[in-house]
Amino acid sequence: MTNRRSFLSASAAASSSLALAQSPSPPPSHPIKLGVASYSLREFSRNLAIKSTKQLGVQFINIKEFHLPYIAKPDDIDRGRKQFENAGLTILGGGTVTFHKEDDNDIRAYFEYAKRAGMPLIVAAPTHKTLPMLEKFVKEYDIKIAVHNHGPEDKYFPSSRDALAMMKNMDPRIGVCCDIGHESRAGMDILETLQLAGPRLLDMHVKDLKNPLGKDSQCDVGDGILPIVAIFKYLKKIHYSGGVMLEYEINGDNPLTGMAKSFSYMRGVLAALA
């Protein structure tokens, strides 16, 4: 984990960008929930991840296990949840959680974790066999499942469309977390995928790419070629109420400058759409 000294150095370097990132939230006509997928801050401790998220002027967060371990004791999960909430952060979900075991007890353990952690949604990476198994737990716990696509390397759900094809008759609380970068790398038209998802679009992971098929071409949002403006126009049009979570996978040791720049760009887009 990044120590306090290196964190402060990174913060100083990012100060000008952070000032932009902390600009006022989008107007009420754009109730887009911009947030952080805490995987972006994977090299930071929980305390520093919370401080970083606050510095970025962000209210919403999706918690990765780095910052609230699945195997933590119940009291530790309670304590971690309170840290996020006491900082004024709204927990929109957790994950990505891998559901590869065809075992009800294993699945239940993750739902119990999510319930205790105050997560209304689990971003999930199931298999073709475990996805149908999740439905009864969604009904029992009233916790949504959003299947995350992981691009060409994902042998189960490279595109959100692959997951959508399996859930046509499932509970409406089962949907997708469309990672727009991976969706592009899977060769799909992102806007068409979002339209196909309809009400099953429960969550989103946002990033940008300079090459639509290039995994190693990730860049700050706004510096690439993904249709960010068109995506936000569409989300506004459908009154999308889920999270739009920045998943910043580059510059792991010093992500704040790029994250701040990405949020500044996205907020600028929303302001322009107003």
Image: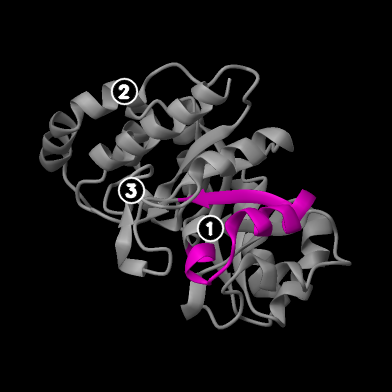
Residue topped by disc 2: 20
Q: Secondary structure at mark 1?
A: strand
23 vs 191: above or below: above
Q: Residue at x 89, y 67 (%)?
A: 169
Classify mark 1: residues with Cα within 10 Å, few (<14), some (14-19) or many (20+): many
Residue topped by disc 1: 179
Image quadrant where residue 166 sits: bottom right
Which region shows up in magenta? Answer: 182-206
Identify which residue, 59 or 214, lies in the foreground. Answer: 214
Q: Secondary structure at mark 2?
A: helix
Mark 3 to mark 2 CA distance (whole Å):
19 Å
Mark 3 to mark 1 CA distance (whole Å):
17 Å
Secondary structure of the magenta portion, mostly? Answer: helix
Instruction: Please check the rendered image and state whether residue 184 is part of the magenta-colored stretch, yes or no.
Output: yes
Identify which residue, 207 or 35, lies in the foreground. Answer: 207
Residue 25 on image: x %, y %: 49, 20
Q: Amino acid at mark 1?
A: Asp
